[in-house]
Amino acid sequence: MGLLDELYSLSAKIKQQAVIIQTEEATKSAFVMPFINKVLGYDVFDPTEVTPEFICDVGTKKGEKIDYAILKSNEIQILVECKKIGEPLNVNHASQLFRYFHVTNARISILTNGQVYKFFTDLDAPNKMDEKPFLELDLLDIDENVVPEIVKLTKSAFDVESIVNAAGELKYVSQIKKIFSTQFNNPEEDFVKFFASRVYDGILTQKVRELFATLTKKAATQWLNDQVNERLKSAISGTAQISTINEPKEDDTEQTITVAPEAEAIVTTENEIEGFHIVKSIIRTVVEPSRISHRDTKSYFGILLDDNNRKPICRLHFNRNQMYIGLFDVDKKETRYPIEVLDDIYLHSDHIKSTAESYN
C-alpha cells in the first residue's frame, strides 16, 4: 500500500479500537508502533532503528526515558513521546521532549496520542525545541495536503535539512490557516472592525459591531463558496486560467507567449501543482527556492531553474492515465520514468538534486 493508504488503514483501526484502549502502553502497541513501522517505514523490532524507552540523563535528572528514539546511520533523528489515546496534547505534555531535544542530535520530535501527531523542530532557537509544531496530523481527519511532508520523514526519503527548511513555511502557513478558520467561524472584534471601517461610514456603535459580526461571517462564507464554485466551473468547462503559456521551443530562454482567447486553454491540474511543490521541497536545499519555477504546456508540466527553458530540472507528464516523471541527463536528454503516486517523485530525489546543482 502507498503511504496515504496506510494512513487511512490506521485511521480505520483507530475508529474500531480506540474505545477499548485504556492505557498509554496499549496506545503505543495498537497505534503508535504501527505508525512508526507502516507509515514512517522503520523496523520497530530493530533497536538500531527504533529504540523504545530511550534513556539519556539530563543534568540532575537521571534515568528518565523517552518513549521512542528513531535512528538512521546510528544517529538519533527523531524523538517520540506518547500519551494515551484521547488525551489532549499540549506543551505541558512535552517536557521530556524539550529536555532530550537539547542534549541529542535529533532535529525532529513527535508528540502523539496515537490519533493526533504533532511534529516539532528548532526554528525559533538552535537546539531548542519550538513550543509550536510545524506540522500536525489527525488520523481521524486526514488532510491529504500534509502527506508529502510526512513522506519526508520516512526512512527511505529522510532528509533532515529538507525537512527543517520546509518546516518554517509549514509552521506559519498552518498557523495563519487556523487564524482564518477561527475568524471566519467566529470573527473577533478587531477582525470585524477592520472590514466594517472600510464599508461603513457611520460610528461603529456596539449595535453596529454586532451587526457587522454577522455580516462578516456571512460574507466570508459566501466568498469561500464562490471560490469553490469557480474552481468547479473551470474544471468542468476546461477553461481554467491557471496558465497562459505556450509550449516553448528548446532555444526559448525567457520569452513567454500569451494564448489567444480563442485558443485551447492549458489546464494546470492540482496533481501538477502538488508535484511542483514536491520537487521544490527536494531541491530547496541545493538552490534558492525563489529560483524554482514552472511552465505548463499542452504535453507536459515543466519545472525549471531561473524560469529558463535551458535549465530544465524535470518534467511531469500527468495528462494520461499512467503518470511519468521526465528526468534529464548531462546532455539534457529526457528519460521518462513511470510513477504510480505523487510520493514516488521522492524516489528520484538524488537525480533531481544533481540536475539542479549542475546549473550552479
Image (cartoon, rainbow, N blue to C red):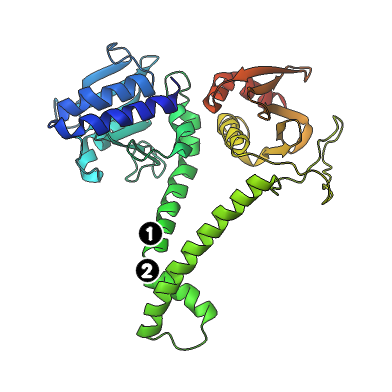
Alpha-carbon span between mark 2 and mark 1: 9 Å
Q: As rendered, which of 8 and 257 lies closer to the eye?
A: 8
Helix, strand, or loop for circle 2?
loop
**267 shown above or below 14:** below
Disc 2 marks which amino acid? Glu
Q: As rendered, which of 13 and 65 lies closer to the eye?
A: 13
Q: Is residue 128 left or right of residue 280?
A: left
Q: In this figure, which residue is indicated by the disc labeled 2?
A: 188
Residue sitting at the far bottom: 202
Q: Residue 94: x and y, percent? A: 24, 39
Residue 124 lies in quadrant:
top left
Asked if residue 25 shows in the view, the reply is yes
Q: Is residue 221 left or right of residue 335?
A: left
Q: Which of the marked residues, 2 or 1, is nearer the chain's N terminus?
A: 1
**131 shown above or below 222:** above
Q: In this figure, which residue is indicated by the disc labeled 1?
A: 182
Marks 2 and 1: CB-CB under 8 Å?
A: yes
Q: As rendered, which of 42 and 120 lies closer to the eye?
A: 42
**89 shown above or below 223:** above
Residue sitting at the far front: 236
Asked if residue 104 shows in the view, the reply is no
